[in-house]
Image (spheres, helix red, strand yellow):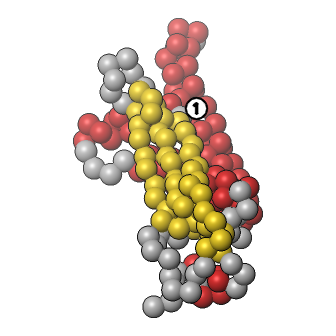
Amino acid sequence: MWEFAPYLMTPIVMFGAWLTGTWLERRHFEDLLRLESGSRDVLAITVEDLPEGWEVERCDLVVGNVVISQDYFKRVAASIKGIFGGRIRVFEPLLERARREALVRMKERARDHGHDTVINVRIETSALARARGDAKGTAGVEVMAFGTAVTLRAGARKQVGAGGGVPL
């Protein structure tokens, strides 16, 4: 019986890694919902030029960045998928979590500096760490959100349409 123990350890460890990674990912998504609801007072939009009627009191560059790593089980699953090609779905939640976290952090920085709007929002990504010594395989990703934080004069935001967009 004990001679099979080494063969059982790998699947047990992989299953444990998968369960732990899934639980941590779910918990991060729940935390993001809470953080996003707390940052709704800061508008973040991608327009490069200010809409007509917006009067800016002051502005600053704001940045929010995050580095997130994928769990080992999902890295293995992505490596297997990479052999056959196609969409690597196990990385999609990683990027979504990183993107949302970076935006929340950028909006928090804007609020900390007294701003109520961030315009010209941009998002950059980069593979930050390598999973293997041969510089192949991604262990982590950095996502950086940045934009121009502005403080608008009283009443200027009322021209923004529902959903945060500027009415056409």
Residue depicted at x 37% and y 17%:
133
Q: Nearer the viewer, residue 153 or 80?
A: 153
Using the image, determine if residue 92 lies above or below residue 5: below
Give the number of callouts.
1
Q: Nearer the viewer, residue 120 or 10?
A: 120
Question: Which part of the image, by quadrant, shows the N terminus?
Answer: top right
Is 41 left or right of 25, judged from the image as shown?
right
Q: Which amino acid, mark 1?
A: Ala
Question: Crowdedness of circle 1 by 10 Å Cα count: few (<14), some, many (20+)?
Answer: some
Residue depicted at x 52% and y 59%:
147
Residue 64: x %, y % from top left: 58, 49
Residue depicted at x 50% and y 77%:
50
Q: Residue furthest top?
A: 3
Using the image, determine if residue 126 lies above or below residue 55: above
Give the image quarter of residue 104. bottom right
Give the image quarter of residue 9. top right
Residue 122: x %, y % from top left: 46, 59
Q: Residue furthest left?
A: 84
User: For numbered disc 1, what is the local secondary structure?
Assistant: helix
Query: Is residue 34 something that shows in the picture?
Result: yes
Q: Which residue is mark 1?
A: 17
Give the image quarter of residue 79. top left
Question: Which part of the image, by quadrant, shows the C terminus?
Answer: bottom left
Query: Is residue 30 something that shows in the picture?
Result: no
Residue depicted at x 65% and y 42%:
24
Q: Residue furthest front?
A: 57
Residue 33: x %, y % from top left: 68, 60
Using the image, determine if residue 6 lies above or below residue 146: above
